[in-house]
Image (cartoon, rainbow, N blue to C red):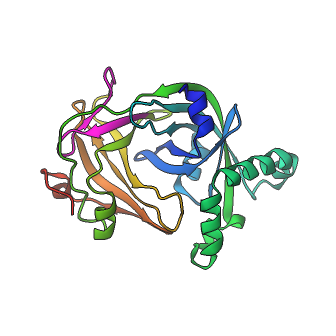
Amino acid sequence: MDPAAALDAADRGLLAVAGRRGPLLTPMAAWWDGAALWMTTSADAAKVEVLRRDPRCAFAVVPHRDAPGALATGTARILGPDEPLRLALHAPPIAGALTALALRNVPAVADYARRAALVPSRWRLDQRVVLRVAVEQLDPLLPPPHVLGVPPALPTELPREVRRKVGGRREVMVAVEGAPPQLHAASWAGGHTLAFPHDTTLPPRARAAVAVDADAGRPSQVTGVVLHGTLERDGALAVDRATWWQGFTLETVDVAPASAAGITLPD
């Protein structure tokens, strides 16, 4: 599958932006119109603040089995209620894109509707913005290598139920600092060491974010973790923060160095 076809077939992916403390990596529902990616998110999300400062970003459709995914890099434009004139001028294409996005994600939309009372106010429609990412480069994203190794235990600062749901997953997505961040599919090769596709070049001691998630496609059921830390040239990740989400709960916690050491089995 070529990368354009992978984008066209996908309804979800991972968005990477260049945060102040390293890349931010977020699972996102998206729709590809052939030239741009359309997404929507909370107006006060950290990635929105980052994109207002630096609109360069990357979006990945995760590869699976032996099929490559897609890696799109481009520039984001934020369309929100703080710019009513812009919204009015671009209302028809925005409405069309959001309709297409909703049709691609009917189970998620229905889940939001059924559980409306539980949805945080900042995630509701009147508190959201639209992201339009004009794609400037589109490449295949290679699958992660098949290697032997034990995935690391997730930090004990995370809730036990979250660790149980996503712990033990071998294949992950990695964002490495850059403008925009690099995105790679990788596999845990033992402990907190990551194996990347052949010929991957990593900057020395780069900030990185590693996404480990169990995306059920319904907002009330998703569970995931992003590990933030420093990536050595040999692929070893020293974790210092972790972001976790479960349903409509989202939190970032600091991780003590001891939590990132050793090779232990997941909960």
Task: Give left or right: position of 7 versus 167.
Answer: right
* Image location (x, y in percent) of residue 183: 43, 35
Measured along the vertical axis of the image, is residue 214 above or below residue 12? below
* Image location (x, y in percent) of residue 103: 70, 53
Q: Which residues are magenta?
A: 183-202
Task: Give left or right: position of 72 versus 40.
Answer: left
The residue lying at 81 percent from left, 44 percent from top is 93
Quadrant, the C terminus: bottom left
Per the image, is 216 magenta?
no
Q: In terms of image quadrants, where is residue 195?
A: top left
* Image location (x, y in percent) of residue 11: 59, 46
- For the image, the number of numbered tags is 0
* Image location (x, y in percent) of residue 83: 78, 53
The residue lying at 40 percent from left, 34 percent from top is 184
Q: Toward the viewer: 78 or 267?
A: 267
Q: Toward the viewer: 86 or 116?
A: 116
Q: Main secondary structure of the magenta part?
A: loop
Q: Is residue 154 visible?
A: yes
